[in-house]
Image (cartoon, rainbow, N blue to C red):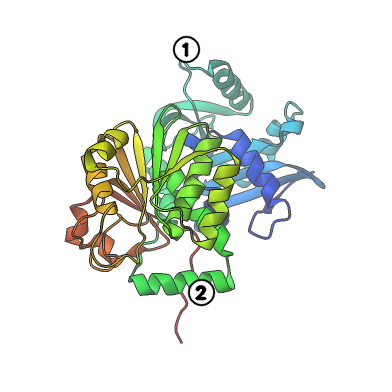
Amino acid sequence: MIRFEKIDENTNNLEEIKQLYLDAFPFEERIPFYIMVLVGNDKGVEFLSIYDDDTWLGFIHTLVGDELSYIFYFAIDNRLRRSGYGSKILHEYKKIHPRLSLAIEPIEENSDNIKQRRKRLEFYKKNGFETLDTKVVEMGIEFELMGAKGMEIKESDYKKLVKKFFDSFDQGRVLSVKEMRDADSYTIANFIDSKELMYRAGEAIFYVANWDIGDKVLILAGSGNNAGDGYVAADLLNIEEIDVEILLIKEKFSEDGKYYFNICKQKGIKYSVLDENMDYNTLLGKFNSYDYILDCIYGTGFVGEVREPVYSIIKAVNNSRAEVVSADINSGMNGDTGESDICIDSDLTVSIGFLKKGLITEEAKKHIGRLVNMDIGIVVEEKK
């Protein structure tokens, strides 16, 4: 008998579920897995394991609203495909959510995966869905909505569901640098291991940026935890076969940063240590050879003036042709005031945990093209 169980951080086979998720969906269609667990079964979301009696079949992740339910992710264990389980699961799930919808890649004859697209379309048609002549865009990719036969979907209902989900992990709260540091310490002491927290930060940065296969990415790494986020991103980029290289400002690491740097070394990811005699023009020429630069030099705790050689590095980054992503904060920027004598000018800044006060100042806006905040499960201790 088909049954559904909630997935949370205590689910026994969480790693198996994560691996199926990574195998089933290309990285450009994924969100960080921890977010699915963090927001799962809350705020109008169902994240469920699927079983036939005691046999694990896969998972389904659905956004649930008053007018509409929308399957975001649905995957069956590779060993059980073509066993008829897909149809059985949808049959049972539609009993719970009669107004069920989903999205598929449109049939475009020049698509690389045209055979898979046709198979998916036929599968869902066989199970009582039909296309609704409505195109939607998720993570920059166009899909076509499908719903149960005879069903009408207002695009506004779909957009409301998706917006509610994405808003749920973009924390609106704003903290000072000290408050953020205290929240990090409290979370690590009581809820999440520091290495896991660093992994989540790097994963968030990896998924938010728009790099793709064929791009060349340079990660500029300082010596603190901010650099550790970059090493995690480097590993994920390498897994997806995106050309990535690390430039260390100094061969110096935080404890957790060293852990993830060693993983990069073991996997053969290219890295070098900055030659401090390298002048501005040489740096500019080097940076112009990359499509993306990920700025992980300084974190939110930076204060004072930027000194050489970092001053010339920042100047060269700002004048390069590369698209620039800053991890948590633009290097050189004061996390409380947004002020700087010089700082990275980013196309995208991915704030981690909570927005820092400095990031939303008028001064900071001069240096940030787009600001996104990502919730990675950091908890602020509520004072009694």
Please tell me which residue is depicted at 27% across the width and 43% down the height of the picture: 317
> Outermost residue toward the top?
109
Which image quadrant is residue 93 in?
top right
> Outermost residue toward the right?
54
Give how far across and how far down residue 27 sits, in percent.
51, 36
Please tell me which residue is depicted at 56% across the width and 37% down the height of the picture: 268
Left or right side of 188 for 206: left
> Outermost residue toward the front?
277
Q: Name the residue under label 1.
A: 109
- Can see residue 50? yes
Give how far across and how far down residue 314 sits, in percent.
26, 49
Report the disc number at residue 246. none
| Label 1–label 2 contact, CB within 8 A | no
Front residue of 341/176: it is: 341
Count of numbered circles on the image: 2
Q: Gap in Å between the C-alphas at discs 1 and 2?
A: 53 Å
Q: What's the amino acid at mark 2?
A: Tyr
Give how far across and how far down residue 61 sits, in percent.
58, 45
Left or right side of 296 for 362: left
Q: What's the amino acid at mark 1?
A: Glu
Front residue of 284/338: it is: 284
Q: Name the residue under label 2.
A: 186
Which image quadrant is residue 319 in?
top left
Please tell me which residue is depicted at 62% across the width and 35% down the height of the picture: 23
Front residue of 50/239: it is: 239
